Amino acid sequence: MIVALTVYFDDPFWIGVFERIENGKLSVSKVTFGAEPKDYEIQDYIFRNYYKLKFSPAVDVVVKEGKMNPKRLQRDAKKTVLEKGVGTKSQQALKLQQEQNKLEHKIKSREQKEAEALRLFELKQLKKKEKHKGH
């Protein structure tokens, strides 16, 4: 399992994107930090909240295995952040997660509306019965 964290500034907040690659599948979670986080704050956040993160559904991705020079990795990471920000696969995974959350919210709110309508109906029926009890 490969885990990466990308922190970038998306006006007006600092955003962290956790990318998890497992069995050739990429899943992503997005975290809003607010003010610019210090390294120790990010580390503390990871220790406390990593297992509570809600990752997106998995998306197929090609994983390259192999070792690279650390300086080359650093240059590539800087170049990637300057050019693209968050990778397109990550954006797709985040969008998928967002739409899934939207559907869940829609279903939950529909159930709440139906329950409220049923409660009001039963209340009306009860009032109707109470009116006719005296006769």
Image: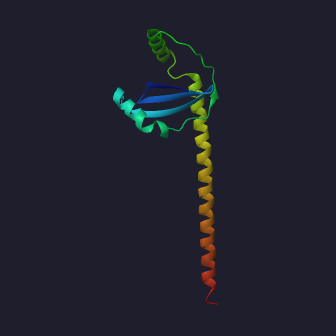
Q: Residue at x 59, y 32 (%)?
A: 95
Residue 7 is left or right of residue 116, and the answer is left
Percent x, y for residue 118? 63, 65
Q: Nearer the viewer, residue 110 or 41?
A: 41
Task: Say above or below: 71 vs 57.
Answer: above
Q: Residue at x 49, y 12 (%)?
A: 76
Figure quadrant of the N terminus: top right
Residue 33: name its quadrant: top left
Figure quadrant of the C terminus: bottom right
Residue 27: name its quadrant: top right
Percent x, y for residue 92? 60, 28
State whether residue 38 appears in this view. no
Q: How was the colour assigned to the protein in this rendering?
A: rainbow
Residue 131 is left or right of residue 71, and the answer is right
Percent x, y for residue 86? 52, 23
Q: Nearer the viewer, residue 14 or 28?
A: 28
Residue 41: name its quadrant: top left
Residue 37 is left or right of residue 53, and the answer is left
The number of callouts visible is: 0
Task: Say above or below: 36 vs 113.
Answer: above
Percent x, y for residue 44? 37, 33
Q: Residue at x 58, y 42 (%)?
A: 101
Q: Residue at x 36, y 26 (%)?
A: 39
State whether residue 26 appears in this view. yes
